[in-house]
Amino acid sequence: MSVYDLLAATAAERPDAPFLVFAGDGGPATVSYAEQVRRADETAGLLAGLGVGPGARVHLMTPNRPEFLDVWFGCARLGAVVVPVNPLSTADEVTHQLTDSRAVLSVVDDALRGTVEPVAGARTVLGLDELVARRGGATPPPAADPELAAIMFTSGTTSAPKGVQVTHANYRRVGELVADHLQVTADDRWLVTLPLFHGNAQYYCLMSALVAGGSVAVAARFSATGWPAQARELRPTLASLFAAPIRMVLARSEPTPDDADNALRLVLFAQNLAPAQAQEFETRFGAPLLQLYGMTETVVPPFMNPLDERRRWDSIGLPLPGIEVRVVGEEGEGSGPGELEVRGRPGVDVTPGYDGRPEATAALFDDGWLRTGDQVRLDDEGRAYFVDRAKDMMKRAGENVAASEVEQVLAAHPAVLETAVHGVPDPVYDEAIVAHVVLAAGAQADPDELIAWCAARLSRFKVPGTVVVRDELPRSTIGKILKNTLRDEVLGAAR
């Protein structure tokens, strides 16, 4: 059963039920399940007329728009493979995406044609406005029964981005497990302010809504000042954010007495929050925060917090049913800290691998265990705590230092809004520790004060030697801090 089949099944039972509420610049617009099926069918018909058939790859590059979903479902209807990518991709990145995925056609937001067309070669480049104008009445061929649904590129911080294969069985499985864990029903509505090209929006929000017959409210873009109003006016019951957008909402939007006047029953988040920030958010919006852990390759989130009294802000939760986890450290398997490895059925629970890259796929799996590259530890109850990305672990005078530990100490300073810590090569001590901080509005603190704060709370080898006070931190489209950019700035300034 494809993701299109899930959509069509609900459309047959409840054709007028809302599927999508799109919050664009012109105000909210609602699309029913039956209307979404029609749009997907017509899009599939147009794509088929342009030579897209079962197994063909369709490059999709657009900000959040309803047409993203039309192409996503239309490809599923045809048995084609959608390749959704970051709309901020450069021409060089698009060249890699098109070539690596072997895409036969690119569908782009019209504002992005200038990036894609010069590198598309002989491929057709279809603008979304043209798609809408041409698809009316287009008839799709008989429905295919595809296996592969999507290819989603990883960030590629240390090598060229790799295409992660996602099957229709992967999508169904993550939708079923998340819907079951969060008790999602047809009455639930997700608020999606993160990019649709990203796994968070697709895996946890879209798929659990599809499985349950619920709906999604999709914003054209994330707005820290606009999020509180969207949480009220679009009447979502569920929302998903990262820690950075949560901090931005708290810092940039003025609290109002109406903030808790919403239908939210929980808000998912990933990446750690300071306890004071979590408490402020829950109190202000009247909705519990529930942390989880996942990555593009795992598809199903290996860890989610429970909905009961065992929920903790500082933990990524407990394993979901059917997912095996282990922590492998320098002394072998144990409670950690060590690398998290996950075992599930490839193509169902976890990705079957990287598209066209057998050697990279073999390196991803260790005797059936998917290596996440992330450091975690487990407590006596099996609850997991995120330590750091493997690439964010620093070596200082022979000792391992987790950037996240230093960040948590700095974040506890009353003047600090957010921080990012990384290492740079040091000829004597392996690596020097550099911290970048953004101060809270109206707050003051100088680097020496912040270094002294760390020295009073951390072992000597963990204390940053340099603190850089900044107006903001560079971010990806989903709010992740770009530490490579910060590291390159520091190294460039030292030359």
Image (spheres, rainbow, N blue to C red):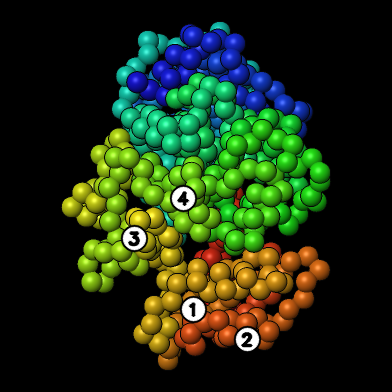
Q: Nearer the viewer, mark 3 or mark 2?
A: 3
Which residue carries the number 2 mark?
A: 452
Is residue 284 visible in the rendered image? The answer is: yes
**Mark 2: which amino acid?**
Ala
**For mark 2, does the 10 Å Cα neighbourhood hold few (<14), some (14 to 19), or many (20 or more) residues?**
few
Residue 409 lies in quadrant:
bottom right
Q: Report whether 147 appears left or right of 306.
A: left
Which comes sooner in the sequence, label 3 or label 4? Answer: 4
Q: Secondary structure at mark 1?
A: strand
Tell me which label, 3 or 1, sits earlier in the chain.
3
The residue indicated by pointer 3 is 380
What is the distance, in whole Å, between disc 3 and disc 4 at their CAs? 13 Å
The residue at 47%/24% (across/down) is 212
Label 3 crowd (10 A; few <14 / some 14-19 / many >=20): few
Q: Earlier in the sequence, mark 4 or mark 2?
A: 4
Q: Which residue corresponds to mark 4?
A: 310
Instruction: Mark yes or no: residue 153 visible.
Output: no
**Figure check: 352 above or below 391:** above
Local secondary structure at mark 3 = loop
First-in-chain label (2 vs 1): 1
Image position of 338 with respect to 81: above or below = below
- Which one is in front, 450 or 481? 450
Name the residue that disc number 1 marks. 424
Q: Are marks 4 and 2 in contact (CB under 8 Å)?
A: no
Q: How far apart are the two marked residues, 1 and 4, measured between alpha carbons?
A: 39 Å
Relative to 365, say whether 259 is above or below: above
